[in-house]
Image (cartoon, grey):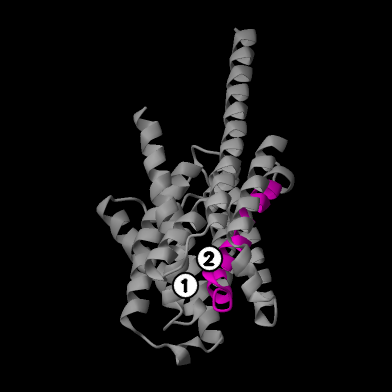
Amino acid sequence: MHSKFSKILTLIYICFVWGTTWVAIKYTLEGIPPFLGAMARFAIALICLGGYMMIKKIPLKPPKGSFKYLFITAILLYLIDYGLIYWGEQYLYAGATAIFFATFPLFTGVVSNFLFKHEEFQWGKYAGLILGFGGIIIIFYDQLLLTNFSGLVVWASLGIIVSAMAAAVSLVMVKKYLSHVETVSLTFHQMIWGVLSLGVIGVLRGEAAYLEWNIRAIAAVVYLGTFCTAIAFVLYYTLLKKMSAITLSSIIYVTPLVAIVAGWLLLDEIITLRIIVGTIIIFCGIAISQIQDRRMVIKQKILKEETSSEIA
C-alpha cells in the first residue's frame, strides 16, 4: 500500500514539474539560445546529481558493458530530443509544441512492440493512447490553427515530432538494456554526454554571441535544472523499473493539462469548454491504457503461477 501511494505521489510530482517546463523553456529562450539553454539546464542538474552521488557515496563509474547504451540513449534523449524541443519552441506556441510531442507514447508503443519487441502488443492499450492523443488535439486545436503551418513553423513542427521519436527509442533502450543500472548513476552518466553534445552544437551554431542574461531566464534555467531534471529524471527512471514503458509514457498526456493551468496563471491564457472536453477524453484514454496494462500484469502473474505449479 505504501509503495502504491509513493508511486502515485511520484507521478503527480513528475506531471506537475514537466507540465510547467513548456512555460519555463519559453522564459529561458528570452535570453539564452536553444542549445546553450538546454546545456545550461542539464549542467545545473549534473552538478546537483554529482553532489548527491558524493554525499550518498554512489559509485561514479558506470557498470561494465553499459557505456555504449548510455552514450546512445544520451544522444537520443538530450541532443536530439531536448535540442529539437528548445529549437522548435522558438517558432511554436507552447501548446502547439505540446501536441506535437504528444506523439511520444505512440512512438514508444511502436518502438517497444516492433523494433525491440520488448513488450507484447495490445490493441486496447493503443486505443487508449490514441483516444488520449485525440483529447490533446481537441484542447490545442485553436493553437494549431494559429501556427498557419508556414515557414519555420513547419520545420519546427517536424522537429518536435522527430524529438518525440528519439525520446521513445531512448526510453525503450533504457528499459531493455539499462534497467540494471542504478537510477542516479544512469541519469548522471547520460547527462554528461548530453551536456557535452548540446554545448558543442550550441558553440558551432554561434549561439554564444546571442546570450542575453536576465533574471527570468536564469530563474527558469535553475528551476528546469533542479526540479524538472535532476529530481524528476531520477524519479522517472525509478518508476520505469516498476511500470511498462508504454504506460509510463502516457504521462505526456497529463503534462499538457498542467501547462494549461500554468499558462492561465502566468500567461493569462483562457480555459475554454474545448479544454474541459479534451481533458475528460485524455483521462478516459489514460484509464483505458492503464486497464489494459493491469490486465497484462495479471495475465503474466497467472501464467507464471501455472508454470510454477506444473514444474512442482
User: Does the magenta-highlighted stretch encompass residue 83?
Assistant: no
Q: CA distance from mark 2 to mark 1?
A: 8 Å
Q: Badge 2, how many Cα within 10 Å: few under 14, some, many 20+? A: many
Q: Report whether residue 114 is seen.
A: yes
Residue where numbered disc 2 is placed: 78
- Mark 1: which secondary structure? helix
Q: Residue at x 58, y 23 (%)?
A: 298
In this image, 145 relative to 178: left or right? right
The answer to the question of whether label 2 and label 1 lie on touching residues, with beta carbons closer than 8 A, is yes
Tell whether 165 sits left or right of 24.
right
The numbered dot on residue 304 is: none
Image location of residue 132, percent across then percent down: 61, 48
* Quarter occupied by the C terminus: top right
Q: Is residue 108 magenta?
A: yes
Q: Position of residue 266 (x, y in %)?
A: 38, 69
Residue 126 rendering spot, x and y as whole percentages: 68, 42
| Residue at the (59%, 46%) spot, across then down | 281
Residue closer to the observer: 42 or 124: 124
Q: Which residue lies under the disc numbered 1?
A: 38
Give the extent of the magenta segment.
85-111
Residue 156 visible: no
In primary-sequence order, the first of circles 2 and 1 is: 1
